[in-house]
Amino acid sequence: MKTTVHILLIFLTFFQFTSCSKSPQEKVKTILSDAQLNEEEKIKMAAFALFGERLKEIDLVKIQDEKGSKFEVYLGFGGTSALTFLGSENYSDHMKLELALGTYKFLQSLQNFRFGKYRMSLIKPFFIKNGEARGAEEFEIYRFRAEGEDLKNVAGFKETDAFSADRYDVPSEQVVTVLKNMIDHWQVELDQFARVEIK
């Protein structure tokens, strides 16, 4: 068991070292072309390559239907800082677009995989004050579900590059249009934005 863990750690360290200068798309292509990885490993490693430390959690369930295998997926996505430069009036809209963009990049990068139920959470650290005690804790503040294949069929999904952005990493207008189309297909399971106080 220890030998297996050591080999995996060495492989991951080597992978990160050799791919640190590559773009997320290039990293994903490298992962997907690795014949030694099974489907679940490819999906999980691709998610890590796309999101890095913003990926809080990933859970996959492989199921079979008449068309073959597909995956139900849950992604916990968020930030590492409780600070924000957004005003309270546009915080929730911006965060939903971030979730949609992450979803778009994930599904488009893994377009050759079939996805069933797709769930994604926004998990963020927040400053809290409880009497004299102060600190930062992570909270799940938003969660949606959708059918992965439905999201892949929204208008513009295949024709637009999910990574298209300006030099400041702001998504292009075409990408934002696709993101809004995707959000229209979401079924919201949790929405705690009203409890978030921006100061």
Image: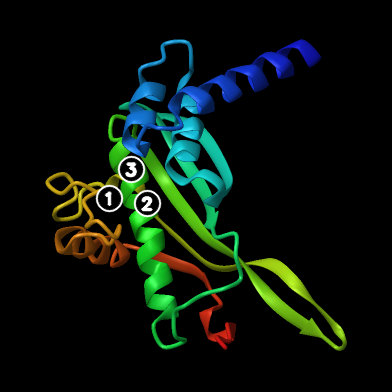
Q: Position of residue 176 (x, y in %)?
A: 22, 64
How far across and how far down the image is residue 136, in percent?
Answer: 72, 70
Residue 97's x, y, as percent?
A: 35, 66
Residue hosting label 1: 150
Q: Which quadrant holds the C terminus? A: bottom right
Q: Note whether 102 is above or below 17 in the view shown.
A: below
Residue identifier under label 3: 107
Cβ–Cβ under 8 Å for marks 1 and 3: no
Q: What residue type is labelled 1?
A: Asp
In this orientation, does residue 1 appear?
no
Q: Mark 2 points at which residue?
A: 103
Is the Cβ of the residue at disc 3 closer than 8 Å to that at disc 2? yes
Residue type highlighted by circle 3: Leu
Residue 58 image-quadrant placement: top right
Residue at (44% x, 85% y) in the render: 87
| Sooner in the amino-acid sequence: mark 1 or mark 3 | 3
